[in-house]
Structures are given as structure tokens and as C-alpha cells.
């Protein structure tokens, strides 16, 4: 079998090595336009799950990279002139260039034909002369662009500007720095990846980026591999307090916007996408190289396990797509949180740190408590003290035990006080007649009101006859409906004082 691989990043190299290891008789050729020794990128972060896969897939590669990992378990959050630390997370990182060296050596030892400094031939030509073409050619994949009708890509360019850098200050933890400056909020994502260097990503919202003077500095064309040195020096000036006398080190570093890549299909004929060519996930959850190497593991295994290329590619995409889409959902939530970080500027350091750690929705209150109970207790205590006007945490005096978790604390909404922060969302039952809610609605809301939630919502109530999504939707546009709602609420009040809300809806063009 003849296999062509386009792109010599970690994903392409790792696939080539795995496939050659599993099928030594295959002819595998990899094209990489850069020279073998060209430095590219900074640190990459791995999860324990990915490392387990690498250990099983190629113990030799795992042994080589694990010997050089930078490991840490803390996350430090700098905000409002204070630092909050949460432990128990567990990370492993490695210099991306060192990872490439290990994979290059492994490919050479296995007999993969790697052609450095050589752009790949046109993908149509490779597809005709090879049994399989693996496109690991990155976020701006020329392969993907060659077959838009086959892959059907969706490219979502986001709003913030960011720059990848490194520093010779070695941080002791995964570090988030969020500062309000006169031009707006500046944020940093930093983590160690060796005993000499840390990754250092600077990010600003577009208008803050302009007000900070970066637009003028970046307003010219940069050559291939050239860095925006003036912007780098400006970043050093702005963030000097966090660099502690150390420097920022660029590598083809310039301001860019993040692009989320999605494809309706990852395969077109005998051409398949891998890594950033197929999908991207925002750097704030550190998944780019991780996803690419997991793709390589799955693709190599699928080709080994299935009799035809078509079946193997279908199995590969079927296995990987749900995992990738789950990661992308978490990354999107994280991305949007950082894009709107200014809205959290009025929070205290404890609450801000908690919200940052749970931004992707994958880490929950319970997850954090399992990892670092003392951190969660401190957050609970700070919120309780704030609610009580600097009084002792709810449930006792300082030092007497953890405070009541925020979910179960009262919440004031204007003149209304909820007993807790649990809300029962609107639920449509489609049981109304002429828009009048009846016994079923009353029974449903009464049961929900007795469940202990702080607020219960009645669902999808139309404001006009033609505003109903269905004829069974309740309404609130005439006296009969108002009277029916009063009856429903009166009956609820006989057994519960839970506030009842209502979802007012106009169906618009959905209406009958």
C-alpha cells in the first residue's frame, strides 16, 4: 500500500510512524515544506488519557518524551492584584520542537521516507498515485481548500487578537494573568514546558488591542518566519511585573485571530484530514497537538483493522468525530468566556478564579471539590462573607467548617429573594385549550414548586393568538387566560411559596 502524508508536524509524523510500525511493508512518504531543523512553536500540553494512548501505541516514543516532561498540578490565577491557586489538576508539557525530534527519529528508524524542505505535490496528483493521502497540513490546509465540496469546511474567525510567545521565566504552574489596564483587559495564558522555558500567550479584545497601540505596530506585511518584534517589546513593557526581569522570546510570532475549523466530512475519496486541517479547538483548553496525535492513533488503528481504505476512513471518522465535537463544545465555551472577560471584572478574586476554572463547563463545582476541597471552601467562604456583609460564612463561624455551596445560597433579584439558585426551566406541555391553562399545568407547576427549587418557570406562553407555536400552547392575551393563571397560582400558593416565573413567547414565523 502506498501512503502519502502531507505535513511534518506532530500529527503527520506520529501517524507515519504508527502506520509503518503496524505495516512495515507499506510505502509511506511524508512531505514537509520546512527544513528538518526549523524551529516551530513552543510548548504542547498532554492529558493523561492521551499519554496512555501513546504509551500503548508506541512505547518507544512514550519513553522518549515522558523522560523530558514538565509536570505540574497547580493553576495560578492572577487577578485584581491577587493570586489564587487551585491544585490537583495534573498536566504534562513538552517542547514542541523536541517532540518533533523524537518523532522524526522514530520515522527514520522505521524507514518512513520523510522529505524535508519539500512542498508536497498537488493533492490531486497524490490521490491518483497513492492508495491513501493523509492531510496533516494545518489550520490553513491547502488540501481542504482543494476539495471544498467534499469536505464542506466551516471556518469561524473569532474576535480577539493573540500572539504565541515563550519566555525564559519558568512558571511553577499553569498561569492565567488577567489585568485591567487603561486600554482594556490584557490576559495571558502561560505554562512551563521545559526546565528553561514557558509558553506565554498574550490575548486582547480587538478594541483593547487597538487602544494599546498594537494596530500601528502590526500594520505591515511580515515575511515568512518573521516576528512582530515591536509588538513583542510592547508586551514585555506591559507585562513586566509578571516577567520578573525575564524576556519574551518570539518564533514567527505576530498578532492573529483564532479560527475554529469544522468540516462536514473529514474524508473525500482516498484523502483524509487529520489534526488542525480537520478541526481546531481554542488554545485556552490546550488541545491542538493532543487532538492531532489522538487522530493519528485512531487512523493508524482503523487502517490496520479494516480491509479497505474506505471502511477504515469511515471507522476513523466515526470514532473520532464525537470526541472532537465534544472537545470543540468545551473549547467554544472557553473561547467565548475569554472573549467577554470584561464582564467579570467586578468580581472578587475568589469568584473570578472559580468562574475561570469552570468556564468550559467540563470542570464543575463537584470536580473542583474533588481536586482541591480547600480551594472550593475558600470560594464558598468568600461568597458567604460577601452576602453577609463580611460576616462569618453561612453555617457557622470562621474555621468551623465549609460554607454553604453557592447553589444553595439565597439570591436577591431586585425586590425578590430566591431561597437558592436552582431554577426549573420552562417545559412545554401543549395541553391548553384556546390558550387557557388547565388542570395539567396546575398539577405540573405545583409538583415542581414543591421540589425545593428557588424559582420555577411556566413555559412558552404566547402574547397573541397568532403567537402560539401550536394550538396547545397557553396564552396571556385575554381575561379568561388571566383568570386561569390566577387560579393556577392560587392553588400553588396553598402548598408552596416558591416564586413562579413565566416564559413569554411570540412564535413569529413559526406560528400556524
Image (tube, rainbow, N blue to C red):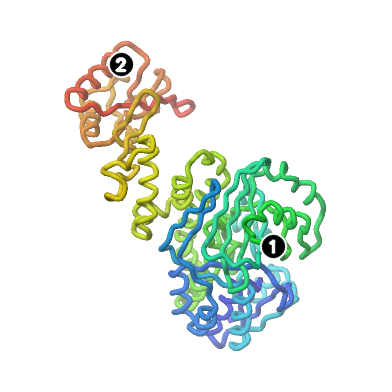
In-front residue for pair 349/144: 349
Relative to residue 286, is residue 182 depicted above or below? Answer: above
Give the secondary structure at mark 1. Answer: strand
Q: In the image, which is nearer the foreground, mark 2 or mark 1?
A: 1
Q: Earlier in the sequence, mark 2 or mark 1?
A: 1
Relative to residue 214, is residue 29 depicted above or below? Answer: below
Residue drawn at (42%, 54%), measured in percent from left and top? 362
Residue drawn at (62%, 57%), measured in percent from left and top? 242
Judging by the rendered image, the residue that carries numbered circle 2 is 481
Q: Which mark is residue 265?
A: none
Q: Residue furthest left?
A: 495
Q: x and y percent of residue 233 in the render?
A: 75, 57
Q: x and y percent of residue 127 in the render?
A: 65, 71
In-front residue for pair 89/44: 89
Q: Which mark is residue 248?
A: 1
Give the secondary structure at mark 2. Answer: helix
Quadrant in the picture for the N terminus = bottom right
Mark 2 surroundings within 10 Å by alpha-carbon count, few (fewer than 14), some (14 through 19), many (20 or more): many
Quadrant in the picture for the C terminus = top left
Residue drawn at (49%, 27%), measured in percent from left and top? 509
Decide if residue 199 is in sight here. Answer: yes
Residue drawn at (34%, 29%), measured in percent from left and top? 459
Q: x and y percent of residue 79 in the render?
A: 54, 48
Decide if residue 310 is in sight here. Answer: no
Q: x and y percent of residue 332 in the render?
A: 52, 50
Does residue 120 appear to the left or right of 405 in the view shown? right
Does residue 440 appear to the left or right of 4 in the view shown? left
| Residues at marks 2 and 1, CA–CA distance in whole angstroms | 66 Å
Amino acid at each position: 500500500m502506498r501512503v502519502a502524508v502531507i505535513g511534518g508536524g506532530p500529527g503527520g509524523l506520529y501517524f507515519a510512524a504508527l502506520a509503518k510500525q503496524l505495516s512495515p511493508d507499506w510505502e509511506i512518504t511524508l512531505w514537509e515544506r520546512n527544513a528538518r531543523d526549523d524551529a516551530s512553536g513552543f510548548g504542547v500540553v498532554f492529558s493523561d488519557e492521551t499519554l496512555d494512548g501513546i504509551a500503548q501505541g508506541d512505547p518507544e516514543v512514550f519513553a522518549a518524551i515522558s523522560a523530558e516532561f514538565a509536570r505540574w498540578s497547580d493553576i495560578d490565577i492572577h487577578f485584581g492584584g491577587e493570586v489564587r491557586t487551585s491544585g490537583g489538576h495534573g498536566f504534562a508539557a513538552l517542547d514542541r520542537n523536541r517532540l518533533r525530534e523524537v518523532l522524526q527519529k522514530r520515522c527514520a528508524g522505521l524507514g518512513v521516507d520523510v522529505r524535508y524542505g519539500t512542498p508536497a505535490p498537488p493533492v490531486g496528483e497524490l490521490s491518483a498515485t497513492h492508495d491513501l493521502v493523509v492531510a496533516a497540513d494545518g489550520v490553513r490546509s491547502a488540501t481542504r481548500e482543494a476539495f471544498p465540496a467534499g469536505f464542506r469546511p466551516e471556518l469561524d474567525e473569532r474576535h480577539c487578537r493573540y500572539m504565541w510567545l515563550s519566555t525564559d521565566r519558568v512558571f511553577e504552574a499553569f498561569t492565567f494573568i488577567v489585568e485591567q489596564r487603561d486600554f482594556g483587559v490584557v490576559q495571558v495564558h502561560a505554562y512551563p514546558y521545559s526546565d528553561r522555558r514557558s509558553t506565554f500567550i498574550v490575548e486582547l479584545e480587538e478594541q483593547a488591542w487597538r487602544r494599546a497601540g498594537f494596530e500601528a505596530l502590526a500594520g505591515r506585511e511580515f515575511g515568512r518566519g518573521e516576528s512582530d518584534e515591536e509588538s513583542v517589546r510592547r508586551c514585555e513593557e506591559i507585562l513586566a511585573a509578571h516577567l520578573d526581569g525575564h524576556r519574551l522570546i518570539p518564533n514567527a510570532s505576530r498578532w492573529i485571530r483564532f479560527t475554529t475549523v469544522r468540516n462536514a466530512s473529514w474524508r473525500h475519496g482516498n484523502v483524509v484530514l487529520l489534526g488542525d486541517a480537520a478541526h481546531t479547538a481554542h488554545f485556552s483548553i490546550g488541545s491542538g497537538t493532543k487532538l492531532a496525535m489522538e487522530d493519528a492513533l485512531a487512523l493508524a488503528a482503523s487502517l490496520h483493522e479494516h480491509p479497505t481504505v474506505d471502511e477504515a476512513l469511515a471507522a476513523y471518522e466515526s470514532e473520532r468525530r464525537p470526541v472532537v465535537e465534544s472537545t470543540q463544545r468545551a473549547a467554544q465555551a472557553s473561547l467565548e468566556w475569554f472573549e467577554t472577560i470584561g464582564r467579570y471584572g467586578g468580581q472578587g478574586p475568589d469568584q473570578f478564579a472559580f468562574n475561570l476554572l469552570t468556564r468550559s463547563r467540563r470542570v464543575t463545582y463537584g470536580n473542583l471539590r474533588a481536586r482541591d476541597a480547600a480551594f472550593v471552601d475558600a470560594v464558598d467562604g468568600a461568597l458567604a462573607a460577601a452576602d453577609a456583609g463580611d460576616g462569618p460564612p453561612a453555617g457557622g463561624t470562621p474555621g468551623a467548617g465549609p460554607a454553604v455551596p453557592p447553589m444553595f445560597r439565597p439570591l436577591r433579584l431586585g425586590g425578590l429573594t430566591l431561597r437558592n439558585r436552582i431554577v426549573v426551566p420552562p417545559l412545554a406541555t401543549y395541553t391548553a385549550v384556546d390558550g387557557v391553562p388547565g388542570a395539567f399545568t396546575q398539577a405540573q407547576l405545583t409538583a415542581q414548586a414543591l421540589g425545593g427549587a428557588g424559582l420555577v418557570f411556566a413555559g412558552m406562553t404566547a402574547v397573541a393568538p397568532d403567537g402560539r407555536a401550536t394550538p396547545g400552547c397557553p396564552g396571556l392575551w385575554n381575561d379568561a387566560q388571566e383568570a386561569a393563571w390566577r387560579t393556577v397560582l392560587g392553588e400553588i400558593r396553598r402548598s408552596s411559596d416558591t416564586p413562579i416565573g413565566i416564559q413569554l413567547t411570540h412564535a413569529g414565523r413559526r406560528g400556524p
